[in-house]
Image (cartoon, rainbow, N blue to C red):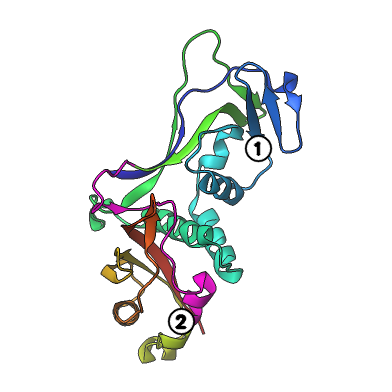
Amino acid sequence: MNTLKINIPQPCSADWDKMKVGCISRHCAACQKDVMDFTKMSKQEVIEYLLANRNNSICGRINLSQLDFHHTELEVMIDSLMANPTQSNRSIWLLAMISLALVSCETELSSINPMQSIDHIEVSVRKDTSETEEVFETGFVEVIMGEIALSEPLNLDPNDIRHITEVMPEFGGGVPALYAYLNEHVVYPGVEKQKKITGRVFVQFVVEKDGSITNIKILKSLSEHFDKEVLRVFDQMPNWTPGLENGKPVRVQMVLPVVFEL
């Protein structure tokens, strides 16, 4: 199983209320680190922050419920990202990750190749049984502190397919240009248009080291005609700018939604 992990390997027992207050964090004298307060952030903001700092170990205070992603919340995030696309490289990563998480909620595991897909977002919290370990509860909200890291299984072979990279692959012009391209080239199937069928098709593909698109596959189908149209357009899509790791091109697998609406 290939899992994108949000790890909290060792919860911290320091007293939040005794930490020195800063602008966006508090300073922990015990470990000499700044502790981010994620408890007031939305789930999307948490993911965006962790993504922007994915190569760092972030010490934070967070509600465990913020790391529990529900189907409806994922749909809202996708709608928000598509309604307000930006040219930020992080936006394509976030859209791809949330799309995959949503598909994973709806798709039987057997329909996805486990060697090439992130099956779900896993939250890993190790709670010590020592007397110093402390978990805070406010009503029904469990709050925990510690180092938070966003990671995926380590790929050592440069030919391995990755899911997150230092620089994500990008369609020329970013997410706005990508969806402008799709709007221009995707043809609404006649039968579905007549029946006023709408919805999303989720497509998985690999951006190769040279930017070409390969391994195109429908992860969530809407109808045979919709699927064929998405496959056709992605098969003819121009090369992307490839993803980079340590300054070198790498193969990156992505999942994106294609929206059909009238």
Question: Could you tell me which quadrant the N terminus lies in?
Answer: top left
Q: Nearer the viewer, residue 229 or 51?
A: 51
What amino acid does circle 2 point to? Answer: Tyr
Residue 25, given in percent of the width and then of the height, sits at 70, 34
Residue where numbered disc 1 is placed: 39
Residue 183's spot in the image, x, y percent? 48, 83
Place of residue 145 in the rendered image (x, y in percent of width and height, measured from the top left): 58, 27
Q: Which residues are magenta?
A: 153-182
Spatial separation of the CA atoms under disc 1 and disc 2 = 38 Å
37 versus 9 height, above or below: below
Residue 60 image-quadrant placement: top right
What numbered label is drawn on residue 181? 2
Residue 113 appears left or right of 56: left
| Kind of element beneath mark 2 | helix
Number of other residues with Cα within 10 Å of mark 1, as a class: few under 14, some 14 to 19, many 20 or more: some
| Proximity of marks 1 and 2: CB atoms separated by less than 8 Å | no
Horizontal and vertical percent position of residue 31: 60, 19
User: Would residue 141 be found to the left or right of residue 188 on screen?
Assistant: right
- At mark 1, the secondary structure is loop
Indicate whether residue 201 is drawn in magenta: no
